Image (cartoon, rainbow, N blue to C red):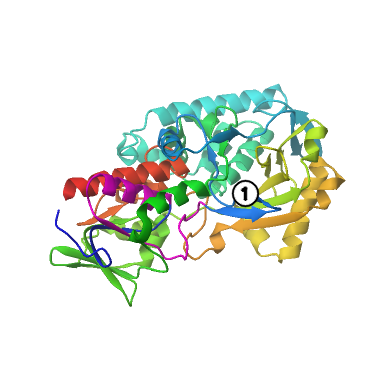
Amino acid sequence: MRAVNAERDADVVVVGAGLAGLAAARDLLTGGASVLVVEARDRVGGRVLNAPIAGAVVEAGGQWVGPTQDRVLALIEELALETFPTFEEGHSLLELDGQVRRYSGTIPKVGPLTLLDIAQARFRLERKAKRLDLEAPWAGARSADLDSITLGDWVAREMRTETARKLLRLAARTVWGADLDEMSLLHALIYMRGAGGLDPLIDTEGGAQQDRIVGGSGLLTRGLADRLGDRILLDFAVTAIRADGGRTVVSDGSREVSGRRVIVAVPTPLRAAIRYEGIPLSAAHLALPDAAPQGHLIKCVAAYSEPFWRQRGASGEAISDAGAVCLTFDNSPPGGSPGLLLGFVGGPDAVAFSALGPSERRSEVLETFARLFGEQARDPIDYLEQDWSAEDWSAGGPTFVLPPRSWSRYGRAFREPAGAVHWAGTETATRWAGFMDGAVSSGERAAREALDAL
């Protein structure tokens, strides 16, 4: 590999300094390539962000890690970070149809017929998911059929009790930030297959919500960025990528950098914000950004001097069908102070919620917290919200949602290179897509592709 001008020229240019782009850049350097990372924001991290609250740190974006998330767990070890378990001691709460019930474990006490309905649905969905080839899930013998209906269609046809349907709908609003009717059945199955089933997606202990990083997940991207130093250019919003002889030029309209290869590591919808000149994009590449929108999930965190709900035997976990907040967690730091309650507003509720004024949103969240955990919840010492759909360079979150027929038509374009352009981002991962683990593995995979091409 030839020597390059470190300010404007490199073997590989990475577009996006989120977890995927930074992981790609790390592996490119390790592989002997020179690299530049350009980032539209004035910070690194993308949808991984530490935020201050009541003198502590809370994760405004991705935060949890769990078993089988091998790539992000390896990064945590590499950076000498520590994890701690999500607090779940005590009873959880289910607010459904005007009643609040206590329960222990993953599944609420909702009656034997409902529990049987949930168990049968989970078994049938996971059986379908296990048959998929995650490298090309659109190519299976029955993939087109699975992609022709929504998950909501399947639930209406296959599940027998209204309570079971409602619980799955609530789960979808936090897992995907979308309603059951907004995604194809195939999309839901691909997501489950990549996580090892439905339970890992929704469980705390043994699942995706098991652990957090001491000091916040923002330490992951900060640690990677520190190693890259001045190879990262901030406030560089890419407007065009063009082929220019044997180089590929990346421009923000006033500045240019170039590389022999380019890795675009941005949320899939944002690919459309870039003009591609002389890059051999397929029809699927061109259509995919509009066909793969992000979900809509808002995080709301209230801080208290202590986690008072623990004294009442509550874990802080709750599911609710009343109001905008559908799921809560105890999000306190390892020492338990300050006490932090996290509430999620997802899917169609998030759209309506975001249209309210700040004080109205805050009041609605605290009303739910008070109803579930007591009047003390109405008076936090600090409060914050994070709505990634309102961020210019995120397009939403926590993950992507493909409607019917999109995987069949455009799925190959998630990872298929276009000339010298490679693609990364958690949406392109085969395992744990939509999670921090998927972001890390996607960056590592894109780096391997670029190194092989070099």
* Image side of residue 167 versus residue 77, left or right: right
Please report the bounds of the magenta region as a residue range.
19-48
341 is higher (above) or lower (below) than 232: above
Q: Nearer the viewer, residue 195 or 90?
A: 90
Q: Does residue 35 show up magenta in the picture?
A: yes
Q: Nearer the viewer, residue 320 or 287?
A: 320
Q: Residue at x 54, y 28 (%)?
A: 122
* Image side of residue 377 versus residue 294, left or right: right
19 is higher (above) or lower (below) than 92: below
Q: Secondary structure at mark 1?
A: strand
Is residue 403 visible in the rendered image? The answer is no
Q: Residue at x 71, y 45 (%)?
A: 340
- Indicate the position of residue 195 as horizontal and vertical percent values: 46, 34
Q: Residues within 10 Å of mark 1 (few under 14, many from 20)?
A: many
Determine which residue is flagged by label 1: 58
> Image quadrant of residue 250?
bottom left
Residue furthest out toward the right = 375
Amino acid type at mark 1: Val
Q: Residue at x 42, y 56 (%)?
A: 267
- Indicate the position of residue 362 as horizontal and vertical percent values: 74, 58
- Indicate the position of residue 199 as horizontal and vertical percent values: 55, 29
Q: Residue at x 13, y 63 (%)?
A: 246
Is residue 318 visible in the rendered image? The answer is yes
